[in-house]
Image (cartoon, rainbow, N blue to C red):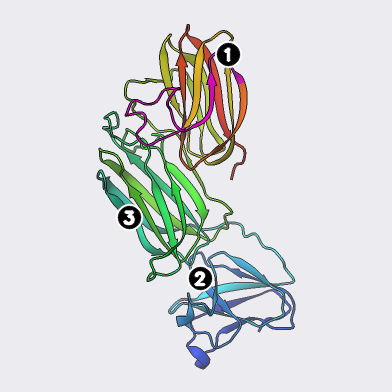
Amino acid sequence: MVASSFTSVTVGSPAGTVAPATQLVAGGGPTVLVFNTSSSVTVYLTDTNDSMSTDAGTFRVTPLGPMGSVVFNGTVDVFAVCALGQTCVLNLYPSAISFNPAGFTAVPLASASGHVLPGLTIDLVSMLNVSAFASYDITLYMHNVLQNNVGSLLTAPIVLTWFDDINSGTPIYVEQWNPWISNTPYAPAVPGIVCGSAPMHGNYLTMSCTNIGAVDFQFDFMNFYGSGRSRSASSWRQQPPNMSTNGIGNWAGRNYNQTYDNILGLFDGQVPAALSTTWIPFGLGAGPATFKIETGAGNNTNIVLAVADPVDVQSGTVAPGNAQPHLTEYPGGANNSLDQVTLPRTPTYVVYQQSAAPSGVSMSLVLDNND
């Protein structure tokens, strides 16, 4: 029974009325904040004392995930159980209305590696029970040493699909990210690792990747973690990796990538020669952003900020006139522009075509938030 003082309660796995559920809050008592101290165990809350361990995950109870907290105003009784064989310590704080624990522990849930053949879909995670977690963290890296071949992908679609149960097959939420694929196998200090975090949206998760190109690529690794940390939005970051292009010059300037923050690209350099076309990959990040470009007076330039189609560079279509879809374009002449754009969950790139003498240019792409 809850007292009007700070206390800790150990919740177990009772079996009906023989061992009633543990009471946390008494109806008619004070406001009580309940904090789950476990980094891995979910506790299930209900308003009756006959809840059983077998009720975990059913409509009878409400889950309180690892390192999670909830406030009750004292108008109803609240009881708690754990899944069969588990125990959990809850801290009870009377009169508290919010709580921010010092830190959260990420719990490893899945890992994967291997080749993705052309035309095939692989499941990185298949109907994984994630009901105990409020959010996820992910790291991954992909490469293809034959990326310069026509038909090789530059980005790969990774689809996360949540379900309420394992039987109906009806998804309740889907999100997709399309990170860059590197041309270099993973090694320490090589750029291109994807780091992402987002809220969970259901009890079970399947994560898949499809190769829509003509050349296989490889997952060097994929690590997936569950967390009790609350997240309001999905946010993935990736610094542009080492990449190949088909007959298009690479950027010859200075490249500052801080993609794990809100700066997706910061460039300062010179287009090397007349009639040259340069493609400049930006980092992965989604949401409102600001694109800034400054070029010298009198330069006959054509500049496009475009969304990365998986195979557009290798099919030879990356040029200002046909890079699709455009987010913004600056045809000809000197440019000193500041544009607001909304970035999809797919990386972007710049195509810079110089038809006069070599010239200097500065560009930046910065997310307007740093979630």
Mark 3 or mark 1, which is nearer to you? Answer: 1
- Give the left or right position of residue 213, taking residue 171 as reference: left
Q: In terms of image quadrants, where is residue 27?
A: bottom right
Label 1 vs label 2: CA separation?
Answer: 59 Å
**Residue topped by disc 1:** 334
Q: Amino acid at mark 1?
A: Ala
User: Quarter of the image containing the C terminus?
Assistant: top right
Callouts 3 and 1 close, C-beta under 8 Å: no
Q: Is residue 344 above or below residue 160?
A: above
Q: Earlier in the sequence, mark 1 or mark 2?
A: 2
Q: Is residue 358 above or below residue 251?
A: above
Give the magenta-colored segment's residue range: 307-336
Q: Residue at x 48, y 81 (%)?
A: 55
| SS category of the residue bearing label 2 | loop
Q: In terms of image quadrants, where is residue 296?
A: top right
Q: Where's residue 165, x and y in %?
A: 42, 70
